[in-house]
Amino acid sequence: MGDSCWMHMTFRRSDLRKITDILGPFDQTSDLDGYVEGEINEINYGGLRERQEMAEAGIPFYGQHSAGGEYGEHGFVSFGGELVDVEIFGGTPVIIVNESDLTCLENVTAGVSPHISNQIKELRKYYDFLNNVKEAFRDDVQVTSA
């Protein structure tokens, strides 16, 4: 038994077989124009191991999972063989600020702590990858619709 949660992800219809071979079946899917939205009601540890495997296989996808007993909600995106996970709250990416980070923020001249800087870099990469995947999906739809 593991720490399970709910997961939702979007991916190309052409990748459905590869994804289900790694992830297993979805509890629910919506077949949209060129891509699929899939939900899994219970997946261990947010499907991290499986998402890493899919990313390493070069499969583009994005989505989110709910909090589990040992972790919070995360948004994720795979692009170019790399997986980026970011903390989210209510579906929106957030940056976690601890007390030492707050001290840095209160004194702007002291600069930004490495903790915040790293989260900002991951958040920027998340949005860059998300935009790239969505653009690739739109390009695929245009090619298949032509």
Image (cartoon, helix red, strand yellow):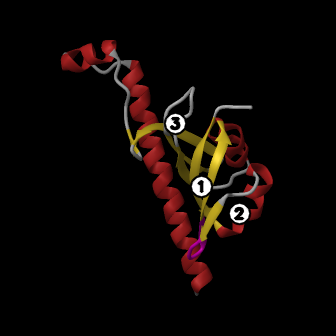
Q: Tell me which amino acid carries mark 2.
A: Asp
Query: In the displayed structure, would residue 130 be above or below residue 89?
Result: below
Q: Quadrant of the C terminus?
A: bottom right
Measured from the top left, where is residue 5 in percent x and y? 59, 41
Give the amino acid type for the residue marked by disc 3 in the picture.
Ala
Q: CA distance from mark 1 to mark 2?
A: 9 Å
Q: Which residue is mark 1?
A: 61
Look at label 1 and name its amino acid: Phe
Segment colored magenta? 31-36
The residue under the point 49% across, 32% down is 72
Which numbered marker is on residue 67? 3
Hey, which residue is sitting farthest bottom in the picture? 146
Task: Residue at 42% x, 30% y: name it.
Answer: 119
The residue indicated by pointer 2 is 15
**Pointer 2 local density, CA inside 10 Å: few below 14, some 14–19, many at least 20:** some
76 over 29 or under it: above or below: above
